[in-house]
């Protein structure tokens, strides 16, 4: 984004940056609730095999000292895909064929999820597919790959019918890619003016302006007719 600007980047030490944006600083919330609920909370964390990322001196018998500022638990992506497979018609048909006698390329994973040649089958759920595409394209460590590389990265783990086309459409609609990626299209030709008519009203152009506030006579559009010779 900065390639179009003539600018210089200078390093500013963090200790001298006393007016840094508050949103860029890690905030520790109120620990009172965690402290009062620490016994049952840490036991539950241990059961789920969760580890604290920031340690504070909170003494808890039989556990490490830790505090939690924010946490959101969600099923793994594979588990969510497996749950959505239960309501997908195509997946149910393929699962039935696999259980009866098998179908080439399809099999059931150890967790019961339908797979195609070792890749989990993503059901036709727009939000789920969009999340997968977004993670494979806009994640900070991926730097907006092109459609070919993005498809190569995804096809090793996921499969659905028309995935390559969906990847190409997703990259094509990416606003950041449209701004900063280099053009790979053929040069666009020059504008070709239309020939000037010889007589008035020989050729006219028409346009419709719609969606206007409705007038007292219940009109909400304008029909514009222009003579190309006299304008």
Image: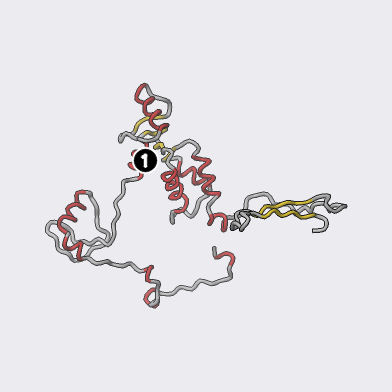
On the image, numbered disc 1 is attached to which residue? 81
Spot occupied by residue 140 in the image (x, y as percentages of width and height): 44, 56
Quarter where residue 126 is shown: top left
Residue most extreme to the front: 217
The residue sitting at 40% across, 32% down in the picture is 91
Quarter where residue 61 is shown: bottom left
Residue most extreme to the left: 61
Q: How many marks?
A: 1
Q: Nearer the viewer, residue 193 or 16?
A: 193
The residue sitting at 34% across, 34% down in the picture is 109
* Quadrant of the image containing the N terminus: bottom right
Q: Is residue 165 above or below residue 100?
A: below
Spot occupied by residue 133 in the image (x, y as percentages of width and height): 46, 47
Residue most extreme to the right: 198
Residue most extreme to the top: 101
* Quadrant of the image containing the C terminus: bottom right
Q: Is residue 187 left or right of residue 22?
A: right
Spot occupied by residue 181 in the image (x, y as percentages of width and height): 57, 55
Q: Is residue 183 left or right of residue 19?
A: right
Crowd band around label 1 with a 10 angstrom C-alpha radius: few (<14), some (14–19), many (20+): many
Quarter where residue 71 is shown: bottom left
Q: Is residue 123 above or below residue 69?
A: above
Q: Is residue 185 left or right of residue 193?
A: left
The residue sitting at 59% across, 56% down in the picture is 214
Label 1 residue SS:
helix
Q: Is residue 211 left or right of residue 117?
A: right
Q: How is the image coloured?
A: secondary structure
Spot occupied by residue 212 in the image (x, y as percentages of width and height): 60, 57
């Amino acid at each position: 984004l900065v390639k179009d600007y003539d600018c210089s980047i200078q390093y500013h030490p963090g200790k001298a940056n006393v007016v840094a944006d508050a949103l860029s600083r890690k905030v520790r919330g109120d620990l009172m609730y965690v402290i009062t609920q620490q016994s049952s909370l840490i036991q539950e964390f241990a059961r789920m095999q969760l580890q604290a990322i920031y340690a504070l001196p909170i003494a808890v018998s039989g556990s490490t000292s830790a505090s939690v500022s924010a946490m959101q638990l969600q099923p793994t992506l594979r588990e969510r895909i497996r749950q959505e497979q239960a309501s997908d018609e195509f997946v149910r048909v393929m699962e039935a064929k696999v259980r009866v006698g098998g179908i080439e390329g399809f099999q059931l994973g150890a967790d019961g999820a339908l797979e195609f040649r070792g890749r989990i089958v993503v059901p036709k759920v727009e939000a789920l597919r969009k999340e997968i595409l977004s993670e494979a394209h806009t994640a900070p460590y991926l730097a907006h790959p092109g459609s070919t590389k993005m498809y190569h990265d995804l096809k090793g783990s996921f499969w659905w019918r028309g995935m390559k086309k969906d990847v190409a459409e997703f990259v094509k609609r990416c606003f950041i890619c449209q701004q900063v990626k280099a053009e790979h299209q053929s040069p666009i030709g020059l504008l070709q003016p239309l020939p000037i008519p010889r007589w008035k009203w020989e050729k006219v152009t028409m346009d419709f302006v719609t969606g206007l506030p409705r007038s007292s006579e219940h009109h909400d559009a304008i029909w514009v007719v222009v003579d190309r010779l006299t304008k």
